[in-house]
Image (spheres, grey):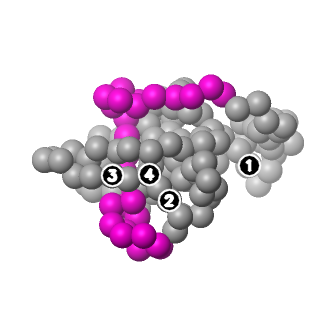
Amino acid sequence: LIFEALARADPAFSSFISIHNMAASMIDRFGSDEQRQRFLPKLTSMDWLASYCLTEPGSGSDAAALKTRAVKTGDDYVLNGAKQFISGAGDSDLYVVMARTGGDGPKGISTLVVPKDAPGLSFGANEHKMGW
């Protein structure tokens, strides 16, 4: 009911907060204890905003067709690929990114938490779309 009331006044705001909540929920449900302790206090207080990053050029939101790849190098992952239509891109503090860590198809997809200051993270021009 809260989001319905928010959407009556501002559909874009309501949609973005819903996306933020989805990203925070993924960290809460599937993240490590260290990730929960590090990120959730800032996300639940709204000191930080989070974006959910699935959609890709040429693949849309079909997770089984993802092309973005994550390769483990030491303790970190190196991400290579492009996402599009990411609400909050460039403004969010944290990005929950779906990427391929295994073979093709629906298996082999992992989710990584990427802070806005991660080396190499960049953003293209904002899309001009109708609506939110």
Q: Badge 1 is on which residue?
A: 3
User: Disc 4 marks which amino acid?
Assistant: Thr
**What is the span of residues highlighted in magenta in the rendered image?**
100-126
Residue 67's place in the image compared with 95, above or below, is: below
Which is more foreground, mark 4 or mark 1?
A: 4
Q: Which residue is mark 2?
A: 66
Residue 105 visible in the picture: yes
For label 4, the crowd category at 10 Å Cα-Cα, with few meaning under 14, some 14 to 19 and many 20 or more, is some
Q: Which residue is mark 4?
A: 68
In the drawing, does residue 58 fall left or right of residue 47?
right
Horizontal and vertical percent position of residue 31:
33, 56
Label 3 to label 1, Cα distance in Å?
34 Å
Please name the residue shown 47% across and 55% down the image. 67
Which residue corresponds to mark 3? 70
Mark 4 and mark 1: Cα distance apart in space: 32 Å
Q: Give the CA distance from mark 4 to mark 3.
A: 7 Å
User: How far separated are the C-alphas under marks 1 and 2?
Assistant: 30 Å
Q: Amino acid at mark 3?
A: Ala
Instruction: Report helix, strand or loop for mark 4.
Output: loop
Q: Residue at x 83, y 38 (%)?
A: 131
Residue 29 vs 122, above or below: the answer is below
Tell whether label 2 touches label 4 (CB within 8 Å).
yes
